[in-house]
Amino acid sequence: MRRIYVHQLPVRMWHWINAVGCVLLVLTGIQIRYVDKIDVVPFRTAVIVHSWIGWVVVANFFLWLLFYLFSDNIKVYHPELNPVQLFRGSLRQAIYYGYGIFKGAPNPFHMSKYRKFNPLQSLTYQIVMLLLLPIQIVTGILLWDLSRFSKVVALLGGVRVVDTAHVLTFIVFVAYIPFHAYLATLGRTTLEHYKAMFTGYEEVDDEEGVDETG
Amino acid sequence: MAGMRRRLSSIGAVVAIALLAVAGMSASAGTLSPGDQKCLACHGSAGMVKPLGDGEALSLHIPGDTFAKTVHYILGCAGCHSDIDLAKHPADAPSIASKRAFSIARTQVCAGCHSDIFSQWKHSVHAALVAEGNPIAPICTSCHSPHAVIKGAAEAMDTVPCKACHGDIFTAYSGSVHGVLRSAGVTQAPLCFGCHGAHDVKVPTADEGMKGVCLGCHKDAIAAHQAWLPNAQLHFEVVSCPVCHAPKAHRTVDLVLYNITAHKDASRPLGVPEFESPTGTDAGHSGLDPATLFNLLKSLNRPGVASKTSIKGRLDVSTGVEAHQLMPASAAISDCTTCHREGANAFQSVTISVAGPSGIPIRYGVNKNVLSSVISIDSIGGFYAIGGTRIRFFDVLLVLALLVGFGGPILHLTVRWGYKRYHKRMQQDEKER
């Protein structure tokens, strides 16, 4: 076994700020939307906290974006353009999670510095980071001050349309966040990937960890 | 001078008034001129009436002492009645169809001197109603008793003429923070005309309502609200002031059918059963359902139609009476959950407005479910209140998301644990064998 450095400091910082931020956004979002059913925090406080955390997550998103745009680590987000490869890799990983893992089969994915996401992870993170989070950021900013952005809101079909996009994306995150947290426990040990996201180092087999493309 | 007056009917009213004013100057204030006293020789007699075309009778009795106290006494009788030729009077007195017709015709006399004010009135909702043939819409003499115009009478609580027609509203106003202060002598507190104007009275529910008027006096209101109210500017745009400042009022959502191309409220769509009545229906009426509203918008914006229609929304109080039950700021609603919760009073009554004749909106009842239906996302894209008008279908999706998000891992974990136990037992069995 050996250790490879895959999670750089800006990525680790972004990840934990994003994780805490998104969980708090979901919780305050539920409080705001269901004040008639849940009464933990006053509505007004929930709105103010939601807005402030939203701005932190927006700034944090740009930390992530700039880091990847201006470093060669962006390779980890390069999409698999070969659909056959993408399908095969995803299916192999899905079979592992849905069957092989129960029997103790080895993970078909081998991590390296520039290939740290398995095909399913890669696809999911591309959707989350390049589609869902930007949708949530844009709609969130519009809803933060509807008067200031009234023309853009009108162009998009009105406040109800913008809110619907925000709520639907929120619902996806409600399903995604616990799933993501659970999948992170499926390493060699339950906390292996969690520790790695603090230290930056992942443990791999001796023959793993070498990038095919360098 | 008397000879001159006989000829005045053929000269313009302005010239007559000017000459009579000069004549009047010679008399001491409150003293009627000899000419006027000559008129009152007959018209000062109580019970003098003229039969009208509609069978009613018009009183021609003018109490001289009352007229002498009015602001118009200085003009004298002929100031307004320059059309009377004393040489032929009363023999050639014209026939009058009705009091209303006579009063409307006489507004032109008022306009002779008060042209600015008359012009304001001409652009008011009152004038629009008169033009529509409304039999009680006010004209000059409705508010200003023609022979008893006393300076300042229209500006006092006791004598303000608006309450003659808007009695219920005036009662509500009297108990409001404005009415109470005005009664106590605080002249900065507005009386009717302070908010609605004396003569250029507009439809209070049209466009952005009375918000601009409120902010005209309460200049720091926006800043004061921004200090504590999230999205304060938006609240000012879609929530009328009395919604929060008349805390006991019933609230209603008024959706407005709006012509985006022409930048004005759309008129009544034809051929839609829910809009059959030309006078509208009550908010409580079941009215348009979400699917009908969706189809209506689709039909109005079908390909080939140049002007596009959308729906704007506004939260208001249900009646004009309630709009005047304004309380001090300390009693205003400041609890956000009053509206931002499912089943809130504010969203139980919904109407849709279209532009009526003369710009007076006509309201039609709408089923309240339009506010929470998934079908309405596009049709009423312009109105949404967090929590209060949330779409119920998304609540179901959220429950599903929670089931997937937490149920999926729990199920996976359970299967892993089960497999592990099964595997262990199998290994043990093998060892034992």
Image: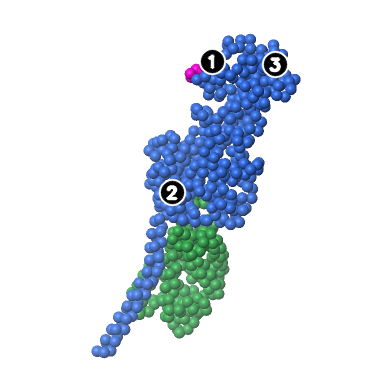
Whether residue B4 sits left or right of residue A76 in the image: it is right
- Above or below, A23 relative to A195: above
**Does residue B178 show up?**
no
Q: Residue furthest front?
A: B46
Indicate whether residue A42 is drawn in magenta: no
Give amino acid for label 3: Pro
Q: Residues within 10 Å of mark 2 (few under 14, many from 20)?
A: some
Give amino acid for label 2: Gln
Chain the render paints green: A
Q: Residue furthest right?
A: B26
Chain B palette colour: blue
Please report the residue visible at 62 percent of the width from the left and 44 percent of the height from the top. B181
Coordinates of residue B14 in the picture (x, y in percent): 67, 21
| Residue of label 3 | B34
Q: Residues within 10 Å of mark 1 (few under 14, many from 20)?
A: few
- Above or below, B350 relative to A99: above
Coordinates of residue B383 in the picture (x, y in percent): 48, 49
Give amino acid for label 1: Ser
Disc nearer the start of the sequence (2/1):
1
Secondary structure beneath label 1 = loop
Whether residue B80 sits left or right of residue B312 in the image: it is right
Please report the residue visible at 28 percent of the width from the left and 84 percent of the height from the top. B426
Please report the residue visible at 67 percent of the width from the left and 26 percent of the height from the top. B69
| Residue of label 1 | B95
Instruction: Single out the mark in the foreground, 3 or 1.
Output: 3
Viewer-nearest residue: B252 or B237: B252
| Residue of label 2 | B348
Magenta extent: B51-55
Q: Are marks 2 and 3 in contact (CB under 8 Å)?
A: no
Chain letter behind tag 1? B
